[in-house]
Amino acid sequence: MSEIETETLFTRIRDREIPADFVYEDDEIMAFRDVNPQAPLHVLVVPKEPIPTVNDLEPRHAELIGRMFLVARDIAREEGVADEGYRLAMNTNAAGGQAVYHIHLHLMGGRQMSWPPG
């Protein structure tokens, strides 16, 4: 964990102050179902360390970010959407659609995805 903890919606979920439907958790990463799903499967893969945006990533985060994608892949397999396809998205700042300033990877599947996303 970083030395300066910033409280976010996701740190409150991490600390069990807010309930969530967890589908995965280890020492560094948690994944839970989105409360406002945009697809039949919509899971957020979140590092426990509160990194505000992609712009705040440092070289030391490289392995963590890679593991987030592997966790998303495994969840897609477990949820039965891996073969048909799914979307992974990480929004950055307001114009990029980021609503919670704690990076998170959206895993969406179970329907045909359109482009642009929406």
Image (cartoon, helix red, strand yellow):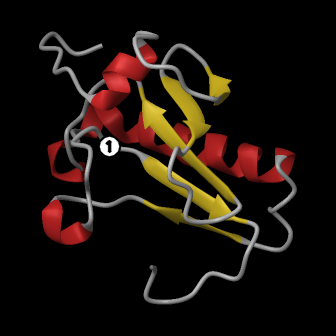
Q: Residue 98: percent from the left, percent from the top?
A: 26, 57
Q: Residue 41: percent from the left, percent from the top?
A: 69, 56
Q: On the image, numbered disc 1 is attached to which residue?
A: 103
The reply, left or right, for residue 44 in relation to residue 4 is right
Q: How many marks?
A: 1
- Looking at the image, which residue is at 43% across and 17% down? 14
Instruction: Please state which amino acid type lies under the numbered disc 1.
Output: Ile
Q: Nearer the viewer, residue 76 or 59?
A: 76
Q: Residue 50: percent from the left, percent from the top?
A: 27, 27
Q: Residue 75: percent from the left, percent from the top?
A: 73, 44
Quarter holding the N terminus?
Answer: top left
- Looking at the image, which residue is at 52% across and 20% down? 19
The reply, left or right, for residue 45 in relation to residue 33 is left
Residue 53, placed above or below residue 24: below
Q: Nearer the viewer, residue 113 or 38?
A: 38
- Looking at the image, which residue is at 70% across and 51% down? 73
Q: Nearer the viewer, residue 111 or 93?
A: 111
Q: Quadrant of residue 116?
A: bottom left
Could you classify mark 1 by the number of other residues whose Cα lies within 10 Å: few (under 14), some (14-19), or many (20 or more)? many
Quarter holding the C terminus?
Answer: bottom left
For mark 1, give the secondary structure.
loop
